[in-house]
Image (tube, grey):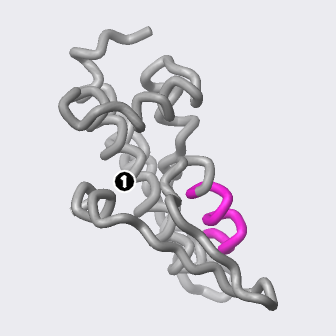
């Protein structure tokens, strides 16, 4: 396990490592599409040498503990990446929703009666932390 004092650097290196894989791929129709290794909970876990359960426990820790804030912010960055790429069409909404649920960042969610719409309500603290 990596020492908590190094987590900030390790987390930054994880995201930068993902960003460094960005390439443009030529599609059959002549258009180009950007691709990179996606930000994921399990990629972050591998970088920190922690299990998903451990990372999610730190996410729910006190705001006064720096390592808990680092984990929470990293998970919010993964969530933002996932949602943005779903909106671009890189992921289906089902994949994006499953990934966001896995992060434990959906404090309130409801589905309408026909099951076709997902309404996500994040608390103000989570929204402010992501800014």
At a point 56% along the width and 57% down the height, the residue shown is 100
Quadrant in which residue 26 is drawn: bottom right
Q: Which of the two residues, 125 or 100, is positioned nearer the viewer here?
A: 125
Where 91 falls versus 65 (above or below)? below
Which percent across, then down, holds residue 88?
Answer: 51, 79
Quarter of the image with the N terminus is: top left
At horizontal 64% and vertical 77% (from top left) the residue drawn is 27
- Camera-side residue: 66 or 64? 64
Residue underneath mark 1 = 77
In this view, 64 is above or below 103: above
Q: What stretch is highlighted in magenta?
A: 91-100
Q: Which residue is drawn at 61% across and 48% down?
A: 102
The residue closer to the viewer here, 36 or 123, is 123
How many residues crowd around disc 1 within 10 Å: few (fewer than 14), some, or many (20 or more)?
Answer: some
Residue 36 to residue 47: above or below: below
- What residue do we see at 64% from left, 79% from top? 118
């Amino acid at each position: 396990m990596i020492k908590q004092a190094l987590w900030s650097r390790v987390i930054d290196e994880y995201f930068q490592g993902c960003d460094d894989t960005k390439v443009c791929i030529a599609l059959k129709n002549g258009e180009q599409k950007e691709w990179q290794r996606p930000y994921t909970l399990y990629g972050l876990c591998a970088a920190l040498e922690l299990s998903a359960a451990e990372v999610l426990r730190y996410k729910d820790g006190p705001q006064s503990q720096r390592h808990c804030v680092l984990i929470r912010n990293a998970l919010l960055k993964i969530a933002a990446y996932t949602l943005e790429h779903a909106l671009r069409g890189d992921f289906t909404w089902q994949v994006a929703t499953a990934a966001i649920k896995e992060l434990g960042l959906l404090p309130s969610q409801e589905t309408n009666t026909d099951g076709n719409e997902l309404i996500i309500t994040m608390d103000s603290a989570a929204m402010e932390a992501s800014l």
